[in-house]
Image (cartoon, rainbow, N blue to C red):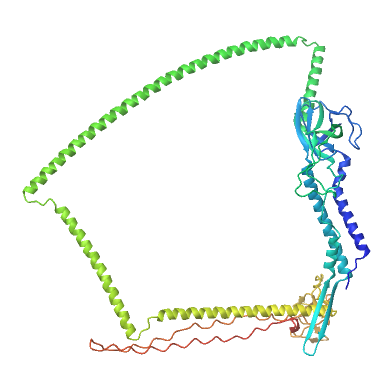
Amino acid sequence: MRFSRPRFFYRLVKLARGLAVVGALLPLAAVATGCVAHRGYTPVGRGQISNGAPVVSAAPGTGALSPTVAVPADLPEADLRIDYDLWLPRAMEVTWRVRCGELVVEGEAGETFADYRTRRLAELAAERERTRRQAAAVGSLIGGAVLGQQSATVATSAPGASAQAGVAVDGAALGAAAGAATVSTEVALAPDDVGAGYRHGHVELAAVPAGVCSMEVAPRVAAVEAPVAVDAAGGALPGAAVVEPAIAIDPALLVGTFQVARRDDPGRRRALIAERGAIELRGSLRGSLIATGADADIEAARARNAARAEVRAAALQAEADARWAARQAREAELEVYRARQRAARAERERVAIELRLAAEARVRVRIEGAMSTRGAMVAYLGRCGGDPYRRDRLAAEARARAEMEMELTARRAEIAIDVRGQLHASLIAAGADPALRARLLEEAVRAANARAAYEAELDAEAARRAEDAARVRAQLSATLVAEGASLRPPMPPVPYEDPGVPPEAGVTWVAGRWVWSGVSWEWTAGQWLGGSIGIGGIGIGAGATITFGAAGGPSNLPPAYQPPPPPPAYQPPPPPPAYQPPPPPPARPQVRDHRTPAVTPPPAPAPPPPPAPARPARPKVRDHRDGH
């Protein structure tokens, strides 16, 4: 089947591209309105940026403006914000200077052509990729609507063989590929795309006095170089290092406007107004006082008072100096006293050291006398037959006894190990099993592993059955819905019922409920149950039941719905009994002596393997056909 592209496909692609361009141009709509005051600032005025040319030309759409903006003096030393919009004929770097009175701030704006070209190519590539994705999305929708899923099967047979081949075509994929192919991925700058446009920025100034503000701009360099050589189509040649001739920029082409805004400071403004009001009030009060006969030469009186105050201040200063000198004299005397105290303390420490040295000398003399006396006593005892080495001899005997005890302990350990080995060999010769403990442990581990594997198999089987039941139920629900059936809607909210006054004592009100009839939800009204009532002189006992509606009359309503009991919870089968090894056979009495040859009894037969655990019955899986 051959795929043909409809004509309206290209129209939809062009419409998508137009919407993308409009969305990209919407953020630039604010440029035409010029600078606006930011929140917290009050506009002062707008001016034209000076470019140093004799004739200043206005920026497009701005009209003729003054190159200076006056800052009002109603709030001195205010914080200013200057926002500028500068028009550049091409991508370039410029320097600007803002002057407000004696305050000067300088900065830079713009970018080089190489930086602009890199950024612009990246933007064009991103825009081209968005357009390509939009075209692919539109093509996918058209291909899916026109072609859909197409498939064809060809079969052939021969006396000895047969073959079959199938082909499937996805219309959405073909449409997406065709739509994406209509948009090229190659991007290049247009010949007239040199980066011309507005550059925006702002500068904040603190404590600016009243005066005028102006802004000057000039090219940073006298010429701008092209980044690389270009081919006939306008694209960059890979690896080319040739640059275009330098392009001179006329400063008169650098035009723009700037706006001065003052930070709002209500507190400072109120303080300034209050200060001015106080000055005016003071002047008016002085004039009123003089008009009513007050002393007009108040300034001379104030000067005389100031002179007397200065004399009094000088006297107080002299008195303070005298007190300071007396304090210094007292501190000097205190320092002399402290020096005497330190000297006395040093003398006491010297005397204490001399006394300690004399006492140590006396102790050394006593120790030397005691040692000489001890030596004489030892010599005397030696002449009398005493043993001078008795203490060393006793210590040597104690060490010998300790070594003997250690040797005896080691010998006993060796004898115990030999006896244990002989007993082990005798038991093996008598028919004992040396690997019984290891075998029992291995059998216990094997049984535990078997039990764990069995439980894991049961859990996996139960999970698989649950998944099968859920899948079958979902498939059956989908089949029924496809055949025209509808899923059960959720239960409606329970309406309000007023049971009214009970018809007699002993009755109980049973609230109404929603009951599924197989097609829709049906409401069953509430009713009174229980009690007894007389009809025609015949008493009806408590065993009978008469139902009444909400108004108190009898109601022929179906019996109350009793939900079925919940299915029994799944109980895992009990684990298989742990393996219990058979008891060992009783020991046979045997009398042996050194003449009886050793006879090895035959080994005991191995215990039978534990019985395999019985496989429990599979739990019953319920589905929607089993009812409630």
Question: Looking at the image, can residue 503 be seen?
Answer: no
- Quarter-of-image position of residue 288: top right
Question: Is the residue 375 above or below the residue 529 in the image?
Answer: above
Side of 10 where 614 appears, left or right: left
Question: Looking at the image, can residue 479 be seen?
Answer: yes
x, y percent for residue 420: 30, 77
x, y percent for residue 207: 75, 29
Looking at this view, is 340 or 98 the one in front?
98
- Quarter-of-image position of residue 150: bottom right
Looking at this view, is 254 or 430 the one in front?
254
x, y percent for residue 467: 69, 77
Question: Is the residue 593 above or below the residue 352 in the image?
Answer: below
Dividing the image into 4 quarters, which one contains the C terminus?
A: bottom right
Looking at this view, is 621 or 434 the one in front?
434
x, y percent for residue 369: 15, 38
Side of 54 where 436 appears, left or right: left
Side of 382 where 135 appears, left or right: right
Side of 252 where 93 appears, left or right: left
Dividing the image into 4 quarters, which one contains the N terminus?
A: bottom right
Counting labels gives 0
Point out the residue furthest to the right here: 7
At 22% from the left and 62% from the top, the residue drawn is 403
Looking at this view, is 115 or 340 the one in front?
115
- Quarter-of-image position of residue 394: bottom left
